[in-house]
């Protein structure tokens, strides 16, 4: 039997840029508690692709795992996360600046799964990719890109390396760490299937070299008995934000730079979040699709930080009530982590497949810096992992009557990953991320218009 140290390899490259942040991870040792709400409001927009079409009607009785949203292979399927009656299908706000059609289900307290669910038969790559589609898998650590599309791209490119991302560099959040501790069997089951059918020749599991090591110990224990143990290795990365970003991870583990517009498959690899991997492994065993979301509930306005597992579509307010409510009125409420999460103005928003945390902060912890003029210190460019100059992009967006798309292109605005390192380090309190996000949006809109123009010219 191999010694544990033989399961580790060193990173291929050091991360450039990034910032050191206090992790505030008080929930490492807390196994997620299960929560069953009385009602769920499930958005038919669960990922970065298009909104799904509803497959149910008001008045229908549904069971857990029953399909309620589908738009074909272009998006991830959506399933009922509770058993009960569909009471409403309508468009509503799911975030401060976003609306989507939502399916509201009042639970019947029976917690029944759909009887026809069964483990999929997987004997080749196409069947495995179809299984990911049927499971409704979308990346649970980022934008929620549909997993079956990612797998199809990796298979077509004959990608050699599978990277499992368990870095979780966002402060407070510990759900990926807990996935490695609590669901290592599911993770290894998924990895073995991916190696067998997609054809990966190497598996690298990225973990952060900080805090308790129960995730490493559990994974190594399971790896000892795996038929593919000779190609699985763990890689410890020094704790630095945003080392968990996909492009940063590929650079650190493979020493390959991924230019803007290119996919991981172009670097002969695929990156999967460990929570997504665990959900896929569970589906391969049971046939039960992704309907639950593990998330960390923490922050100075929360009485006791906890990890919970809640059905997709659970309202933030119901989760806060379940964990004991607020200690004090929150000054800021965030869905996700404090660096890349979304500040919300209400507890009436539902969680989705990509929600990994709910953070509530009292004013002392959430007060932002007073904005002053830029002092041209260059710190934002120094910490930017994408090696762009955030202040130049911000100026191009905000200082002119109409932003110049060509200038934004020249400044590589589209390369920004919105990690917030620049805003975090800025001594002038400039809301750089707001400008960068607008710049990316303008560039994307310009590219789309150019494509439409070219298409019409070709016609």
Image (cartoon, grey):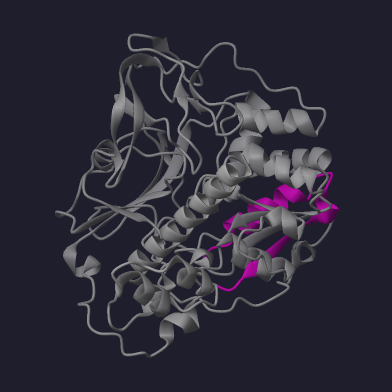
Residue at x-position 40% and y-position 67%:
436
In this rendering, would 110 be left or right of 124?
left
Q: Is residue 231 magenta?
A: yes
Tell me how many marks there are.
0
Residue 182 visible here: no
Q: Nearer the viewer, residue 429 or 9?
A: 429
In this rendering, would 427 be left or right of 121?
left
Residue 231 visible here: yes
Q: Is residue 111 above or below residue 168?
A: above
Q: Is residue 185 magenta?
A: no
Q: Is residue 113 above or below residue 1?
A: above
Query: In the rendered view of the protein, which quadrant contains the N terminus?
Result: bottom right
Residue at x-position 81% and y-position 38%:
197
Q: Nearer the viewer, residue 405 or 65?
A: 405
Q: Is residue 241 above or below residue 321?
A: below
Q: Position of residue 443 (x, y in %)?
A: 47, 60
Residue at x-position 80% and y-position 62%:
3
Task: Specify start and end residues of the magenta stretch as a single range.
Answer: 211-238
Q: Position of residue 108 (x, y in %)?
A: 34, 14
Q: Nearer the viewer, residue 259 or 186?
A: 259
Q: Position of residue 148 (x, y in %)?
A: 65, 37
Q: Quadrant of residue 334?
A: bottom left
Query: In the rendered view of the protein, which quadrant contains the C terminus?
Result: top right
In this rendering, would 232 be left or right of 358?
right
Q: Quadrant of residue 163?
A: bottom right
Q: Position of residue 346 (x, y in %)?
A: 21, 45
Residue at x-position 44% and y-position 26%:
81
């Amino acid at each position: 039997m191999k010694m544990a140290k033989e399961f580790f390899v060193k990173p291929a490259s050091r991360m450039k840029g990034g910032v050191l942040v206090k992790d505030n991870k008080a929930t490492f040792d807390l196994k997620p508690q299960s929560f069953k709400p009385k009602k769920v409001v499930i958005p038919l927009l669960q990922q970065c692709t298009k909104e799904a079409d509803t497959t149910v009607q008001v008045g229908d009785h549904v069971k857990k795992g029953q399909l309620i949203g589908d738009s074909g292979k272009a998006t991830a399927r959506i399933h009922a996360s509770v058993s009960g009656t569909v009471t409403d299908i309508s468009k509503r706000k799911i975030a401060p600046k976003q609306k989507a059609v939502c399916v509201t289900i009042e639970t019947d307290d029976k917690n029944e799964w759909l009887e026809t669910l069964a483990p999929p038969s997987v004997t080749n790559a196409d069947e495995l990719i179809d299984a990911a589609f049927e499971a409704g898998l979308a990346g649970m650590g980022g934008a929620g890109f549909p997993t079956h599309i990612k797998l199809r791209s990796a298979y077509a490119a004959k990608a050699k390396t599978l990277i499992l991302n368990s870095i979780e560099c966002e402060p407070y959040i510990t759900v990926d760490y807990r996935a490695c501790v609590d669901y290592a069997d599911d993770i290894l089951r998924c990895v073995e299937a991916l190696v067998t059918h997609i054809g990966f020749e190497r598996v690298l599991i990225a973990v952060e070299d900080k805090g308790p090591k129960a995730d490493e110990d559990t994974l190594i224990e399971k790896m000892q008995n795996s038929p593919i143990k000779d190609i699985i290795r763990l890689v410890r990365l020094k704790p630095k934000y945003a080392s968990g970003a996909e492009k940063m991870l590929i650079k650190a583990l493979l020493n390959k730079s991924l230019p803007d517009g290119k996919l991981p498959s172009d670097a002969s690899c695929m990156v999967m979040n460990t929570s997504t991997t665990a959900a896929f492994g569970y589906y391969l065993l049971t046939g039960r699709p992704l309907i639950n979301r593990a998330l960390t509930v923490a922050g100075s306005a929360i009485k006791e930080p906890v990890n919970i597992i809640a059905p997709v579509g659970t309202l933030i307010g119901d989760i806060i009530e379940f964990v004991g409510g607020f200690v004090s009125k929150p000054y800021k409420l965030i869905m996700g982590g404090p660096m890349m999460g979304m500040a919300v103005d209400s507890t009436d928003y539902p969680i989705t497949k990509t929600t990994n945390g709910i953070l509530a902060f009292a004013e002392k912890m959430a007060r932002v810096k007073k904005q002053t003029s830029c002092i041209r210190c260059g710190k934002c460019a120094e910490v930017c992992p994408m090696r762009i100059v955030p202040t130049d992009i911000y100026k191009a967006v905000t200082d002119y009557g109409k932003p110049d798309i060509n200038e934004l292109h020249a400044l590589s605005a589209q390369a920004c990953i919105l990690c917030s390192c620049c805003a975090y380090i800025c001594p002038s309190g400039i809301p750089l991320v707001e400008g960068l996000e607008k710049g990316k949006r303008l560039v994307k809109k310009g590219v789309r218009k150019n494509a439409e123009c070219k298409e019409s010219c070709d016609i």
